[in-house]
Each structure stands twice: as structure tokens, then as C-alpha cells.
Image: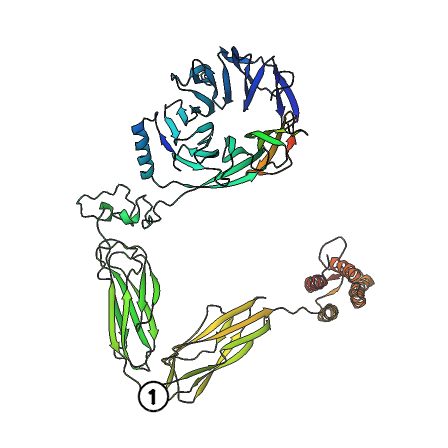
Amino acid sequence: MTSTSGGIVVYQISTGNTHEIATATIIQEPKIHGNRVVWREGGALSAMVKYYELGWLGTAITPRTLAGPVPPTFDIQIGDRFAVWAELDGDWDIYAYDFSMMAEIRVTDTAGINERNPGTSGAWIVWEQDSSSIEAMHMDTAERISLSNGAGNYNPTIDGDLIAWETDVTGNLDVWVYRISEGESYEVTAISPGSDQYLNDVFGNMVAYVDMSGGSEDIYVATLEFIPDEPCADFGGDGDGDGVCDDDDNCPLVANSDQSDSNGDGIGDACAGTPNLTITLEHSPLEPTAADLILFTATVSNIGDAGAGPSRLLFDIGGEHPGQYFDVPELAPGESHAVERRMVLIAQNYINNAYADADAVVAEINESDNHAIDTFTVVPATLLPEIAVAPEVVDFGQVELGDFATAIVTVSNLGEGVLTLHEIALGDDTVFAVEPLVVPFDIGTNETVDLVLTFTPMAETPYSSELTLLSNDGDETFVAVSLSGEGVVTAVPPSEQIVSILDFIDESVAAGTLAGDGAGKSADNRLGALENMIEAAGEDIALGDIDSACGQLRSAYRRTDGLSPPPDFVVGPAAAELAERIVALRETLGCE
Amino acid sequence: MKFFAVEGRLSAFAFLFAAFFAVQATVADTLQTTNRRITSSTAYETTPTLGNDGTTDLVVFTLRPVLAGGALDGGDIWYQPLVGGAPSDLPVQIT
């Protein structure tokens, strides 16, 4: 910043200290980048561009003159490589000082055209030309950018890949940015139509600017996020990621960005050799009756001469709509994948359909053989079964870990024909089980069978599953019973734990697995003292003095934990379990 | 609104060509902006300059209070620490 006495003052943010690095009668436009400060010094007709390399440690360095005395000079800026400014040498032109070359450069030399307001970042220098276009030049490659829109364009700033500037193309000043790498322009301040945004500065992914719509000039900062567009979104995607959209790709499942097609047949060379999926449909038994469980099989085969990627099979039985989808894995040439469905159908003529590659994701040599049809008739049954299951929801409730609960589900045949259970299945969760029943299992008319279910929780958590019955009841081929239950652990009350610990001591002493530890009578005294601690804890619990109980139990534990000091009061194989029981009681009480 | 970016200075012909070229270009990324008001006093805050002091982003600006008659007082330099383009602490007056 400039000081009131006509000098350059640098403020160090980390320390709050100020350093005056230059003094002169006329000093203006100080700019800083990294450790370099640049400014204009002297009168309008004989200005000098000067700079100072900051040492931060107070070492005085005489400011260096980059240019001058020079004609009227304004708009000084500095970047990591260049200091730039505009000089009135007949008309306004852009000049630069290259710190890497330690040389002054004339950037523009155009008669009758005014270039002003330069900015710089890296090897790029950007400027405003005749208030109508934004120009930029890469000083190493001479790459040139010109941004125009028929309106006024002003005050470019640049940082890295972004050029920001102001334009009045919409009738008032707005801030725009241009991405050099992408060659695209974007409006930054579209949210404020009707008001001016100006005096921009771009840095990283931020652009600062001034807006006066609040009644006085205020500072705004816009953060920019460039969201990549999917160029193939409307053209079938790009399944092989080769940059050619699937709608135009001559081999959409194999990356071939060159799209080579030597024989010109429309199929890329990378797809020479093409998969070909075909499908067959079967059912068993061949002449089913209404009482039969029919097995339907759809087989997808790759009869082509190249591997087929994953596909999907659409398989509908008896004209059901829309049918069911099944995933088909990759199939090498000659490989097949079979999908089975089972169903009971009442007497009627049926048409089954199966479509290989239902999503058409495999580029095949021949799509016409992807559909198979199976027509058949079910022989009517004169007497039909009718399944009834009760209950249809079984809740085992809360069951203690280590325990189990049982329930019975009754399957009845209310029809006139024999009911056959073909499958009794449970979900994957092994905590539920059903008593084995050999299938197929026939249930005569008006007869029942009880299925015994058990629930054996393995963890302190809720469980749910489903029991599925597959039968020859044509209108209820699958019947499901919902199962639920919860494993729980019921805490033993502290008073009962006290009694249990004392009983454990008595039983262990009687069994010879626990004894007092010490010489002579001190052994019995120590055992008695330990029992007294536990009894005292029991009394504290009864009185509600949990803190005192915890203290007693802590002392008792330290006399049983096998560590010294203090020495243990008991010895024997049961001492460790005694210590564990004391710890468990402390946990029940919530002792710290 | 499309800006026309070409190499070299635009002639009338080049201008038209630039317009055609821009329409044929590949789909551009979408810009998503978050615009935050950093100052909101009755004073005039202007000449923002963005930077980073090695610890945080910040925007340095000039603040000129409005005097009783409506004129602007002399300016002081302030800076506002930023995180993600949003103020992260109180602004600091350095002059």
C-alpha cells in the first residue's frame, strides 16, 4: 500500500508488522506477488516502474528500476514471471518486464489501437483492447486468445487457467471467466441481473468483485466449480470408454478410439469376431397337469466367435407381464447359462417367452435369434387342492441368548385334490429352523401337517426372515410366513449377583478350588475379610449407596486379580472366575 | 451468450467463422457458482484483491466510510480471511 508520506509500506499478515520499503514524492499503484513488490514512481511524464524483492528480515534492498523514465505509465500488475503495464507511446501499448530473463519486452505494437489494463499469470499476459475485446498471449508459444462479443469488455485479470473480465453485453457490467484449457466462457454474476459487477480479481477458483446493488459498494466473492458434462449422455453413453459414443461406435463394447474398419462392413476391426446370443426354452414335465409343479428352463448360449459381455434375460411364464429379469454373466464362445423357474399352472393354454440380452448391451452379429417361445397346454385336474397356512406371521418375541423358542405353523388342504408341498424354504439366517419334512409331501383333502419352527438367537439383536412354501396350489403356488424374534440378555439383579458370588466362594472352598492365601490363621482371616467386603457391598446396594458398593467391590477385586500389590486374599483355580464375577457386578452397577 | 475465442485478431470474416466454430464445439463443462457477499456496511468497500498468505485465502479491500454530508472519507485497508470463498473469521483492519 502507499503511505501517507509518499512511500510503499508492506504489511506482514503473520506478524502484523509494517515495513516501509520505498519513499518518493509520487508513488502509486503498488502491487505484490510472492516476495516481489512493483510500483510506479515519479511524475506522469517521466515515470519509472520499480520493484523490490522482499527479505522480510529487515535487510534493506535498494528498489530496482524495471523501466524508465518512460511516457505516461499506468495499470501496473505483477505475476510470478512478469511485471506488466501500459505506456502511452503515441497510443497505449502493453509492456512487460520478464523477471526470468531480466529484460523489458514490448508486448503490443499496434498503431491507433489502445491496449490497457494488463494482467499476467505464468507465461500469459492479458489485456483490454480498445475497451472492446480481451486479448491474451502466451509469451513462450505465442498462442493468442481474443475474446469479443460486440459489446464492451474491460479489466481482465488472470490466474492459472482462468481469465476474468467485465462486459456490458447484457446492458450492465457482469463478470465473466474464460477457461484457457477448455476455450469456453462463462458468466459468473448471472445471479445479479440489472446491477453492475466490476473491479474483478481472479485467484484459484475464486473471483472477487464489487457490486453496488446494496446501496454502497460491497465486496463479493464467487467460488467456481466446473462440472464436467457427459458428452455421450444423449448418444447412448460410452460403454467401452473409448471416447466414441455408443450410438456412433462401430464396436461399442471394445475400446477402439481409432474406429478402424478394414473391410468397411460397419463393424470395427476390434469387434472382428462377434458374439451371438441365442436362447432355448424347455419345460418339464412335457405334459403337465394342474397338479404338477412345472420346471421351466431358459438357456442363453453364445454361439458366436467372440466373448459376450454380461447381459440380461427377460423370462415370462404364462404371459405374465412384464416377466422377470435375470442377470447373465459373461459367456465365452460356446458357453451357456441356464435360468430355472418353477410354477404350478391351472388348466389353460400357455405361451412362455424368453429374451436373451433383454437390455441389448451385447453387440451381436445376429439379434434375430434372441427370442424363444414355448407354447403348451396344462391338462386340467378335476380335483384341485387349496392350501391354507396359519399363522402367516410368527413372532417369537424376546428370547434369552443360549435359549430357544418354538412355534408351529399348520398347513391345511381345504381343496378336493391332493396338496403337494414341493419345497419348504427358509431365508439365509440360520437362527430360524424348520423341522425337516421330506418333499414332495402330500396332504390329503381336509388334512393338515404341523411345521415345527425354532428360533435360536445368536446375538442381542432383532431377527426377521421368511418361511416359503411351494405347492401345487395353482392360485397360491408360493405362500410366505413372516418370522421375527429378538435375542436378549437379561441382566441378573445386583443383589442376586452378591448372593451368587458368596455362594460361589462357599462352593469353591468346599470343592477345594479356592482358599484363603496366607500363613497360619491369616489365610482364613483373609478369606473372611474378602467375604466381608462383598457382604458390605451387598448392604450398600440395599441402601442405594452405589459409590460405596463400587469401592468395596474394587477392593475385593484387587484382592483376587492375581496381581500384587496388594497381595491377593485367595488362591486357587476358582480365583480367576471369582474376580470375573466381581468385575461383572461392577459393570452391572456402572462402577467407574 | 457465447464469446468467440480465436487466435489472432478478428476480421469480419474471422468473426463469422468464430461464431460457426463455437456452435460446433464439443459440449462444455457447466459452471456452478456460489456468490457470497463479503461486506455489507454502509461504507464503500472496493478494489478487492484475492490472495493467500500461506495459511488461508483472503481478500484485501479498501473501506471508505460515508461522511455526514454523503462524501466519502479517506480509505483504509482491510482484509477478510476466507475458506472456500466464505468469510472464516472477522475482517482485519491493517491501516
Picture layout, residue A54 above or below residue A475? above
Q: Is residue A173 visible?
A: yes
Picture layout, residue A392 above or below residue B32? below
Instruction: Give x and y (percent) for residue A130.
Output: 42, 23
Residue found 33% across the figure and 58% down from its top: A329
> Is A335 situated left or right of A126 in this image?
left
**Camera-side residue of A393 and A127:** A127
Picture layout, residue A362 above or below residue A394? above
Picture layout, residue B50 above or below residue A233? above
Instruction: Give x and y (percent) for residue A395.
Output: 55, 75
Q: Looking at the picture, which amino acid does disc 1 mark?
A: Leu
Instruction: Give x and y (percent) for residue A270.
Output: 24, 46
**Camera-side residue of A375 and A124:** A124
**Camera-side residue of A164 and A66:** A164
Give the chain letter at badge 1: A
Q: Quadrant of the N terminus of chain A?
A: top right
Q: What's the colour scheme?
A: rainbow
Q: Quadrant of the C terminus of chain A?
A: bottom right
Tell me the quarter of the picture where residue A442 sits.
bottom left
Q: Which residue is mark 1?
A: A383
Instruction: Give x and y (percent) for residue A476.
Output: 39, 79
Residue found 55% across the figure and 72% down from its top: A485
Tell me the quarter of the picture where residue A370 sits.
bottom left
Q: Is residue A403 visible?
A: no
Q: Secondary structure at mark 1?
A: loop
**Camera-side residue of A47 and B68:** B68
Task: Give the residue at the far front of this rendering.
Answer: B69
